[in-house]
Image (spheres, rainbow, N blue to C red):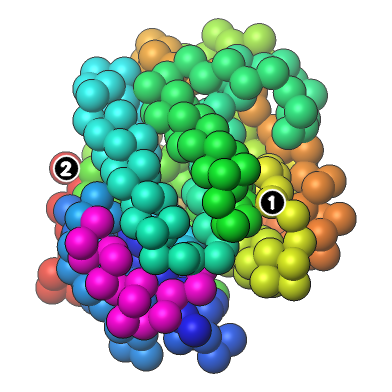
Amino acid sequence: MSILVTGGAGYIGSHMVLALADAGEEVVVLDNLITGFGWLVDNRVTFIEGSVADQALVGELIAQHNVEAVVHFAGSIVVPESVENPLKYYKNNTAASRDLIEACVAGGVKHFIFSSTAAVYGMVGLEPVSEDAVLNPVSPYGRSKLMTEWMLADVAAAHPMTYGVLRYFNVAGADPQLRSGQSAAGATHLIKVAVQTALGLREKMSVFGDDYPTPDGTCVRDYIHVSDLVSAHAVLLDHLRRGGESKTMNCGYGRGFSVDEVIDTVKSVTGVDFPVERGPRRAGDPASIVASADRIKALGWTPRHDDLREIVDMAHRWEQYLNTRNDRPSIY
């Protein structure tokens, strides 16, 4: 039996592959390499370049490798881009996921874990948001992910498949052994952008809005280390394999930091005081979104890297490593 990881050459997916390989699992990676990098894929696993929407290919992989479970990371993830180009997100996220799920049903896949997002909640207050909160995504990105959540619930009701949905908050950091990290060109993740600015790879960085109803006026987010995030997937997969029911759960620490607090932390960790400019708000950005993580903790998940300085330090060290590579991606 094996596990198929879609988007396994991307940031979070490559960390999931490492965790599964470290645990001795047989892993197959499917990635089209549009935003992923082949060199991020661990050499202990089988890598196939292709699309999750290619049902013939997915069906062949399921049959050939006796795929028991799929962990689905592949998709587009930039909120402002989704506002500018919504059809791209409904194609890459919703339509492609629909095709993948159909191939999984046809192939008899038992378990399906989906990489969702806190963006399904939309505009919420300053208090931690629970999984039972009203779902009101304000961006095509959030809506495209929520549609896939709905599809999984409907499919699981009609077919012998259990599923897990993990709603990510803000993922950051890098593998503690520096085997993988955020490597995408033009990444918009705050910590990565701030670290790049500290290293002189960017002349300056921007803060998008400082008039939000938060303590310092900048957006508040729950930053979770990528290794803790993938350990949540492992806990959920084990739950499903043991016959557990389908679950939808938040993945965060339950504590938020503002944009200004993150920038100050990056300056402190790196020892560099870099230029920051103030700009207007971006479309689709809620003022604050922090996880209530009681459900995933009750399942046995215990975070090991719940420290913003540690997250920033690992992101900084990964960016330094990337800067030594001849094939490092352009940031622009």
Callout 1 secondary element: loop
The reply, left or right, for residue 328 in relation to residue 145 is: left
Q: What residue range appears in magenta?
A: 55-69
The reply, left or right, for residue 287 in relation to residue 320 is: right
Callout 2 secondary element: loop
In magenta stretch: residue 107: no
Of callouts 1 and 2, the N-terminal one: 1
Q: What's under tag 2, amino acid-wise?
A: Tyr
Which quadrant, please, contains the C terminus?
top left
Q: Main secondary structure of the magenta part?
A: helix
The reply, left or right, for residue 233 in relation to residue 327 is: right
Q: Is residue 292 above or below residue 309?
A: above
**Residue 74: percent from the left, percent from the top?**
35, 52
**Residue 282: percent from the left, percent from the top?**
39, 16
The mark found on residue 332 in the picture is 2
Between 297 and 27, the residue placed more toward the observer is 27
Mark 2 neighbour class, 10 Å CA radius: few under 14, some 14 to 19, many 20 or more:
few
The residue drawn where x is 23% and y is 24% is: 87
Q: Is residue 104 above or below residue 53?
A: below
Which residue does the numbered mark 1 point to in the structure image? 246
The residue drawn where x is 44% and y is 75% is: 67
**Residue 166: percent from the left, percent from the top?**
61, 48
**Residue 316: percent from the left, percent from the top?**
44, 61
